[in-house]
Image (tube, grey):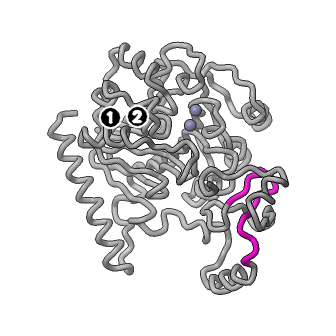
């Protein structure tokens, strides 16, 4: 795509963002749902799963693709989010690599949606989460495809190409499947947790890596996003999927600066929540939880009626002794104001962090220091 078209698109994106901001702040009676989230457009949802990656691609013709499925503690949130988008069937699930912040809730996806096929890199990995996923793939009769660079497939009018990994690596991040999606004139590059070494090898293949949207590698870590790689991609929009207050201190400031210096607008799920980029194949629109109502309202989806909100706050003020809430199933505990609390029936309450840890629960990286 020419630089001029790219620039034009960038400006349009900015205008779209500005209009959305004005709508959101100015007049709440106008829904900002306009054409940008029209069912006639492609939608790429960067789902706010905390520290981890998950991207849902919805085609206007009804096909769905899911790249990664967050960590084990976002299972309910992720399933409910995807259901809230009207999705019942997922044509292709892509597991970029077997780290738990990418495949943690993938088993829940296979159990809650009709999944036709799952693509994974060629890699042996010995963890309970990954092994359970492999069993679940068989149990749910999902076709398992070991993807290699050069593979490609279509879903609706979107074309997907597997660009990497172009070598075998020992490091699990570097074997991340690198996916380029083309929809009309627009391109989207998803790189999983690919690090600099794999970026270099990708560059040496002579691919055209130019894309309008980049899912930034490895949650904005400085192990990824080399200047050479960014120079080749030259995205208008970059999205970093990262948990608020995560213990790894991601994303790194120098990486955000490096990306932004190239004229790229950077969005982060820890700051904006869910981020949806939609397109008619020519222009890009960005919507986030801040700028757009009803992308996903967890309270509504989890069955809390709007009218009962006063009851809710009354009961929580009567029980101030519980500062931490654990999930019986995942053994992860959250601060009571975390956006990803487990369903009521799975909750265990703790007054202190120590009490939770003594009970064998581990802190949720997104909300507990
Ligand atoms: Zn990761
Ligand atoms: Zn990883």
From where the camera sits, is residue 63 visible? no
Give the extent of the magenta segment: 320-334
Tell me the number on the disc at residue 189: 2
Residue 160 in picture, x, y percent from top left = 45, 31
Given residues 136 and 203, the one toward you in this image is 203
- Mark 1 and mark 2 in contact? Answer it, CB < 8 Å: yes
> Where is residue 350, by image quadrant?
bottom right
317 inside magenta stretch: no
Judge whether 38 appears above or below 71 on screen: below
Q: Residue furthest front?
A: 354
Residue 315 in picture, x, y percent from top left = 72, 82
Which residue does the image show at 63% across and 24% down from the upper left?
145
> Where is residue 322, by image quadrant?
bottom right
Given residues 317 and 20, the one toward you in this image is 317
Q: Earlier in the sequence, mark 1 or mark 2?
A: 2
Q: Residue furthest left?
A: 4
Q: Is residue 183 left or right of residue 219?
A: left
322 inside magenta stretch: yes
The residue tagged 1 is 211
Residue 37 in picture, x, y percent from top left = 40, 59
Q: Secondary structure at mark 2?
A: strand
């Amino acid at each position: 795509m020419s630089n001029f078209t790219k620039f034009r698109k960038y400006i349009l994106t900015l205008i779209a963002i500005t209009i959305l901001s004005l709508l959101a702040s100015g007049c709440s009676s106008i829904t900002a749902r306009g054409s940008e989230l029209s069912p006639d457009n492609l939608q790429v949802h960067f789902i706010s799963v905390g520290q981890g990656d998950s991207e849902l691609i919805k085609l206007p013709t009804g096909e769905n693709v899911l790249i990664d499925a967050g960590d084990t503690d976002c299972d309910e949130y992720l399933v409910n989010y995807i259901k809230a988008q009207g999705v019942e069937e997922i044509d292709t699930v892509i597991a970029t690599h077997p780290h738990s912040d990418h495949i943690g809730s993938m088993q829940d996806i296979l159990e809650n949606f009709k999944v036709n096929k799952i693509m994974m890199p060629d890699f042996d990995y010995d963890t309970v989460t990954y092994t359970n996923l492999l069993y679940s793939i068989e149990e749910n009769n999902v076709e398992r495809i070991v993807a290699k660079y050069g593979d490609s497939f279509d879903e609706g009018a979107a074309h997907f190409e597997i660009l990497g990994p172009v070598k075998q690596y020992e490091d699990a991040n570097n074997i991340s499947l690198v996916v380029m999606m083309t929809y009309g004139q627009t391109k989207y590059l998803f790189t999983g947790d690919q690090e600099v070494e794999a970026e270099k090898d990708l560059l040496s293949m002579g691919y055209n890596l130019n894309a309008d949207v980049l899912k930034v590698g490895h949650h904005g870590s400085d192990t990824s996003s080399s200047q050479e790689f960014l120079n080749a991609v030259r995205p208008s929009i970059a999205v970093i999927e990262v948990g608020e207050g995560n213990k790894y201190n991601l994303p790194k400031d120098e990486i955000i600066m490096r990306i932004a210096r190239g004229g790229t607008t950077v969005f982060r799920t820890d700051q904006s929540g869910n981020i949806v980029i939609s397109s008619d194949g020519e222009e890009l629109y960005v919507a986030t939880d801040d700028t757009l109502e009803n992308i996903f309202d967890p309270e509504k989806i989890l069955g809390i009626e709007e009218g009962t909100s006063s009851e809710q706050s009354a009961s929580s003020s009567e029980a101030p002794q519980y500062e931490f809430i654990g999930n019986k199933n995942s053994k992860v505990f959250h601060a009571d104001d975390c956006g990803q609390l487990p369903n009521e029936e799975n909750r265990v309450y703790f007054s202190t962090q120590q009490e939770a840890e003594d009970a064998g629960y581990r802190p949720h990286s997104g909300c507990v220091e």
